[in-house]
Amino acid sequence: MFASRGAGPVIAGLAAVAAFAILLETAISVGLIGGFVVAPPTAIAAALPKFFAEEAVGRAFLLTFGSTFAAAALAALIGIPVGYALYRCQLLGRAYENWIGAMFSAPLILLYPMFLVVFGRTPAVCIAMGFLVGIIPVILKTREGLLAARPVLIDVARSFGASEREILRKVLLPAARPPIFTGLRLCLIYAMINVVGIEFLANLGGLGFLVGEMFDRYDIPAMYAALICLILTSALFYTLTGRAERWLGAR
Amino acid sequence: MALTVSGVSKTFAASDGGSVHALDDVSLEVREGEFVSIIGPSGCGKSTLFQIIGGLLTADRGDVQVNGRALNGAPRDIGMVFQEESTFPWRTVLDNVAFPLELAGLGKGEREDKARHFIRLVGLDGFERKFPDELSGGMRQRTAIARTLAFQPSILLMDEPFASLDEQTRILLGDKILQIWRELKQTTLLITHNITEAVQLSDRVAVMTYRPGRIKRVIEIDLPRPRSSEIIASAEFGRYVGLLWQDLREEATRGMADSERKAG
Ligand SMILES: Nc1ncnc2c1ncn2[C@@H]1O[C@H](COP(=O)(O)OP(=O)(O)OP(=O)(O)O)[C@@H](O)[C@H]1O
Ligand SMILES: [Mg+2]
């Protein structure tokens, strides 16, 4: 299910997970790690059927996936043009680059009560937060990618009479595609962390809420089952962006 | 079509606050169907002249005319092959070569047919589906040449297209260029710093001075056509090489001293 072709990498990946599970199981059974903090993998596996049967996992997944996707899509839709504007206007680019970078390392998630006030207790809070954090790497990576496009390639297009629009579509964006996709991947990661975090903190439903709920019930194996669902969701995003990048590259 | 460069001068502002007088009153004519080379030491302003003729840079003074008409930023019938690596790494050879046809609005089938024709012309058939990073430097440069040929310009302008290649590949590609030139009868201006290449290919060679770049002398290469690279062995060829080196030596020495002074 991961981006690389062939069964080899998948098998290797699963083998590593299995090896880790066995190690963990052993460590817990010999008392190296407390079983109350970390659930033994066999207990998590045993808890899965009940977890899926009793909790609305599918709906939680859809909510988290949907909110993250919406936040990232908005961030891409607005972030890529903003990155382009900062590239075109060098002065603005130099002026704002550090500010935007600084915002990236600020704990923006602490603003979530404000968003609750604005949007009420709806998934819009998660989307808005995810968007706010996710747009930053999109802007920075888009600008960086465009700046790194080799000038001679632009000259080639110009020598064939290409318009500015054609240069953007056929030279600048393809040249900047790898960094832009790096930006989008970072965007998805940060958007998801924030979406899940707020679901957890503000009891807004979704997988984040489910993790918190299981913890409140002190059902540790189920809590880890919910976490595994989260990891799979993020793996799904990773695969999807890889697909999208290759699809764009093949055109 | 004939290409006329008259009185072109260009000065750049240098990063240290001073200025670089790159070109000074350069005039040159390339007649219809003629193959002319410009040779000069490194840093003498060849690429600057290339960009001005191609319309990517504006001259401070002077102008460039095609068939007697000045081109002021108008789209021009000049195809450019760049000194640097210039293939699009995300496009296959076929899509690279079809690029100007795509801009011209040709349909997929038509532009691919045309592109294949020019790929064959530069001897890259069989590599249509390869990406540039799967090719050698010489093949990449041939892709760039095919792409410019596909633009079907009546004037072909090349800036050291083989500079990054080894001597043998360079000589063999020279043969290829001559063969294409015979076939397409394009007016061709080649910029180079390689004396052998200039003599092997040209009807006339213009020698440029080191900064400011001026045309020092134009030498007629009166060797028989059609030529092949075997001509390199002839005494006549050697005489032209010697003649050009006499002119160039002084300029190259000045250029070297200049760059050593900068480094020191
Ligand atoms: N955009 C620019 N700004 C400032 N100086 C420039 C610029 N372009 C070229 N120069 C300077 O003008 C001079 C001529 O440069 P040019 O690239 O035309 O030389 P060249 O003959 O093509 O050299 P080479 O043989 O190395 O390709 C050089 O000293 C270069 O540093
Ligand atoms: Mg040059």
Image: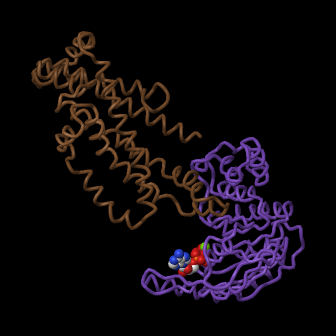
Chain colours: A brown, B purple
Q: Which quadrant of the structure image shows residue B228?
A: bottom right
Give x and y (percent) for residue A220. 15, 20
Give x and y (percent) for residue B37. 74, 75
Give x and y (percent) for residue A207. 25, 25
Q: Residue at x 33, y 34 (%)?
A: A68
Q: Residue at x 79, y 53 (%)?
A: B121
Q: Residue at x 65, y 77 (%)?
A: B49
Q: Is residue B163 above or below residue B143?
A: below
Q: Is residue A46 above or below residue A78?
A: above
Q: Which quadrant of the structure image shows residue A171?
A: bottom right
Q: Nearer the viewer, residue B197 or A231?
A: A231
Location of the C terminus of chain B (image quadrant): bottom left
Q: Is residue A91 above or below residue B130?
A: below
Location of the N terminus of chain B (image quadrant): bottom right
Report whether A4 appears left or right of A67.
right
Q: Which quadrant of the structure image shows residue A125?
A: top left
Q: Nearer the viewer, residue A60 or B138?
A: A60
Report whether B51 appears left or right of A84.
right
Looking at the image, in which quadrant does ligand 1 appear?
A: bottom right
Q: Nearer the viewer, residue A236 or B211?
A: A236
